Amino acid sequence: MDPRFLNISNVSIRFAPRAPNVLQSVSLDVARGEFVAIIGHSGCGKSTLLNIVAGLLQATGGGVVLDGREVDEPGPDRAVVFQNHSLLPWLTCRENVRLAVDQVFSRSKSRAERARWVDETLALVRMEHAADKKPGEISGGMKQRIGIARALAMQPKVLLLDEPFGALDALTRAHLQDQVMQIHARLGTTVLMITHDVDEAVLLSDRIVMMTNGPEAEIGEILTVDLPRPRDRLALAQDPRFLAARAGVMEFLYARHRNPADAA
Amino acid sequence: MTAITSLAPAAPRPHGLARLSPAPGLLAGLAWLAAALFTAAWPDRQDVDRSLTLAALQVLGAGWLIAATLLGNAVPRLGIWSRSVAAWAVLLAVLVSFWQLVTAKLDLLPLPFFASPQALLEVYTDDWARLGDSLLHSVLLLAKGYLIGAAIGFATGVSVGWSRAVGYWVHPVLRLIGPLPATAWIPLAFFVFPSSGSASIFLIALATSFPVTVLTWSGVASVSGAYYDVARTLGASQRFLIFKVAIPAALPHVFVGLFMGLGASFSVLVVAEMLGVKSGLGWYLQWAQGWAAYASMYAALLVMAAMCTTLITLLFRLRDRTLAWQKGLVKW
């Protein structure tokens, strides 16, 4: 297992020449197949970090290397699921997924193979029944599932989730978290997920990266979640290791690095 | 099987549609029959030839209304149609009868300015060939100019919205020339172009292209950056971004431009036909005025209105098909 499959080294970024750095020397190594959550208060720059990995933003200093190749532009080896507006509204769900599949596998798979692959991925998130609907006709949770299906369909080296369940109700969120865990277990995808939900971070990830408040945000602490998989949310609710990890993150976020908006 | 059939009679209308009352449709049919009787039986004071034809048409209309109403239970679409047009049908019967009363029947309004319905009908029965030919020429001329103008406007709008360099060069030209009414070019166009036909095509294209350009441009410029981010993370090329993201996302704006362009093209079409082209409905109007054939003018205006509204309806149909994903569309 390559411990430096995704290598973020000394990444700094600022949005204007004289402005302070939003991120200050962020370094993080993610192993192949690892599930890493990044947590922090709003405005700490966690989405900025994800966008740098995605290639949508260019770091001012430092760089990102994925599987031996430096990241300098967006590409299908790093699939992103955004919090919302991930789907193109004028295409059906199937067409949204097919767009990505055609883009990535136009040479390596035949037309029929690609069509079958699209259906398989839709089945993976159990969305075959809504395949021919437009995004405007389905619920927010379903849209996120299609977004995840599209990301997985590209067979990316790393899956980047930017608060993917942030806009969903608690029940739908739990349901999708379970689905993501199953998919991760089955495909062994490397995942980098932004979240502001402590339970979600502990439940899903192998490591939790806690960010300090911006500007000049940096990694404050990294917590290894030493819980066996598969994980069951009901059983974990009583598990002392789960509670300890949860308490550790809470302590970081609410005692040592309180939200600047509350502190004032 | 028995279980199902025993349930079925309880709900003869499973879709829960309330049974439409046939009364309004039948009333409208009767109103048209009465109007037909009035047309045929009341003696004409003006010298008109087509009273019996008009009455026959009114009977046909009445028959259609009544038939649609009676078939309404079997064919729901017909029933809904007859119900929705019933009030208008009654009003039309009354209006046409009143129009006849003050023209053909009592001769209260001066001829030839106020033509009777019979006189209009006579234009259609006797001069349909010339009217039809004019309509055909108008539609052909409009189609050529409009399609050229829409294509140029669309391409210009996309390039201006997409490329800063193109925008730099085209924007000032657009600002200077665009707001000028296309009709202002008429003297120049008829002088420069080899034929009045090609000049008219140019003018119609010009009138169409300005709103299409501006709205396509604004559509492309206002596409949410999130869509581009999504597409770029799929590894999209520039080509992909333009054709699969920018253009589909801009289409709602483009259709507004096409609609405005169509309106502008109508007015240029008519003016061009009145001033230079020797065919088409505009020319027909002009020609009818020269002969003081006011009935022909009214008849031509009616045809023109039908043409314009049909074309706009077609455009809206196209939009509804293309933009089914968009919510809150206005119905034409």
Image: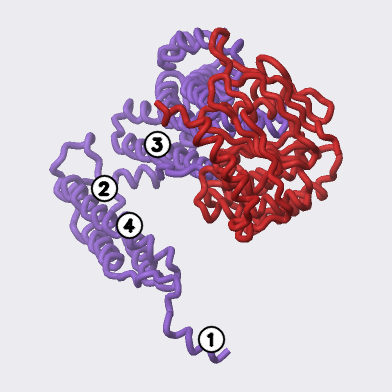
Chain colours: A red, B purple
Label 2 amino acid? Val
Chain label for disc 4: B
Chain label for disc 2: B
Residue sitting at 76 percent across and 43 percent down? A189
User: Could you tell me which secondary element the residue under label 3 belongs to?
Assistant: helix
Q: Earlier in the sequence, mark 1 or mark 4?
A: 1
Q: Indicate the quadrant containing the N terminus of chain A: top left, top right, bottom left or bottom right.
A: top right
Chain label for disc 1: B
Return the mark for residue B85: 4
Label 1 amino acid? Ile
Q: Local crowd at mark 3 within 10 Å, few (<14), some, or many (≥20)?
A: many
Classify B9 as above or below A205: below
Q: Local crowd at mark 4 within 10 Å, few (<14), some, or many (≥20)?
A: some
Q: Earlier in the sequence, mark 3 or mark 4?
A: 4
Residue linked to disc 2: B48
- Towards the viewer: A193 or B15: A193
Residue linked to disc 1: B4
In which quadrant of the rendered view does residue B38 lie?
bottom left
Are the residues under badges 3 and 4 in a single subunit? Answer: yes
Return the mark for residue A253: none
* Distance of label 2 from label 3 (alpha carbons): 24 Å
For discs 3 and 4, the disc positioned in front in the rendered view:
4
In which quadrant of the rendered view does residue B20 lie?
bottom left
* Distance of label 1 from label 4 (alpha carbons): 38 Å
Are the residues under badges 2 and 4 in a single subunit? Answer: yes
Q: Is residue A230 visible?
A: yes
Return the mark for residue B304: 3
Query: Looking at the image, do the residues carrying marks 2 and 1 touch, with CB atoms under 8 Å apart?
Result: no
Chain label for disc 3: B
- Towards the viewer: B223 or B39: B223
For discs 2 and 3, the disc positioned in front in the rendered view:
3
Q: Earlier in the sequence, mark 2 or mark 1?
A: 1
